[in-house]
């Protein structure tokens, strides 16, 4: 069972995609959003922190800006879910804002307007039109079985200073961080894009498979990262050397 946080504005259309991706990976999804259902971390074996509105900069020492759409109730919900997940050693997949929240909870910071910092091509689309390069010795590379991916992009914020225990797993052509991860248990992977919109591509489905493999291992008190990597090694359809 995987708990999934979603926006109050868009959860009705995003959660079914998340649930399908998790089901295809061998799990079941439980929807969490502010004001919708009480969060019970003891009822799940893993967590997905979904995408949506920008995160309040006050959470990481930034300054409030005009014209930015925030959701303080969701910030509180998700920061609490992440802290509780780490306390219980539950595996985590962070998606877009979820990746950013993962970084913040572990003490990191964000660029509020990342495209003013990096010379990255600014694309806003749910289609896989942006290329990201994946670090060779990373959990993401082994999970996705790829050295680069074509992804979608809906974000304006991005990781600045890394949180404790995290490493960069992927960047775009302008150097902007596109994925972060932990290399030790509990499993935690954050991607700047939205793989739930790309489940028709194998590499993106594999991210959910890695999470579910880690969740099954964690339920049995086994090593999570090792289980995710074992699942990736044994999966069919290798893609090494190419992009998807």
Image (cartoon, grey):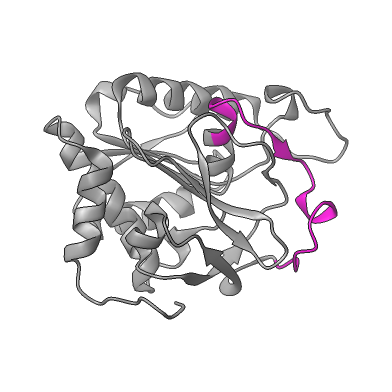
In the picture, the quarter occupied by the C terminus is bottom left
Q: Nearer the viewer, residue 124 or 69?
A: 124
Q: Spot the residue most to the left.
A: 220
Q: Is residue 106 above or below residue 205?
A: above
**Coordinates of residue 43 in the picture (x, y in percent):** 23, 26
Q: Judge left or right: residue 222 versus residue 75.
A: left
Q: Is residue 54 above or below residue 221?
A: below
Question: Which region shows up in magenta?
Answer: 103-123
Q: Is residue 125 visible?
A: yes
Q: Residue at x 37, y 52 (%)?
A: 139
Q: Nearer the viewer, residue 196 or 17?
A: 196
How many marks do you count on the picture? 0
Q: Is residue 38 visible?
A: no
Q: Residue at x 55, y 67 (%)?
A: 133
Magenta stretch, main secondary structure class: loop
Quarter holding residue 108: top right
**Coordinates of residue 25 in the picture (x, y in percent):** 24, 57
Q: Residue at x 65, y 25 (%)?
A: 72
**Coordinates of residue 76 in the picture (x, y in percent):** 56, 22
The answer to if 116 sits in the magenta stretch is yes
């Amino acid at each position: 069972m995987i708990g999934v946080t979603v926006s109050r504005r868009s959860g009705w259309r995003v959660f079914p995609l998340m649930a399908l991706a998790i089901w295809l990976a061998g799990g079941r999804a439980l929807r969490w959003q502010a004001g919708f259902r009480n969060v019970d971390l003891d009822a799940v074996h893993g967590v997905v922190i979904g995408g949506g509105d920008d995160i309040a900069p006050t959470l990481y020492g930034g300054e409030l800006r005009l014209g930015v759409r925030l959701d303080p109730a969701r910030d509180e919900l998700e920061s609490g879910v992440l802290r509780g997940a780490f306390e219980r050693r539950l595996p985590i997949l962070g998606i877009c804002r979820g990746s950013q929240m993962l970084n913040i909870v572990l003490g990191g910071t964000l660029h509020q307007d990342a495209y003013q910092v990096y010379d990255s091509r600014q694309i806003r689309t749910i289609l896989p039109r942006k290329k990201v390069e994946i670090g060779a010795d990373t959990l993401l590379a082994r999970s996705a079985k790829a050295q680069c991916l074509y992804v979608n992009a809906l974000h304006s914020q991005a990781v600045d200073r890394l949180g404790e225990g995290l490493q960069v797993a992927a960047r775009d052509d302008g150097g902007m961080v596109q994925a972060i991860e932990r290399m030790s248990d509990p499993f935690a992977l954050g991607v700047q894009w939205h793989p739930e919109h790309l489940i028709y591509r194998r590499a993106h489905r594999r991210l959910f498979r890695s999470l579910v493999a880690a969740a099954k291992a964690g339920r049995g008190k086994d090593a999570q990262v090792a289980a995710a990597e074992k699942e990736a090694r044994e999966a069919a359809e290798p893609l090494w050397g190419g992009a998807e």
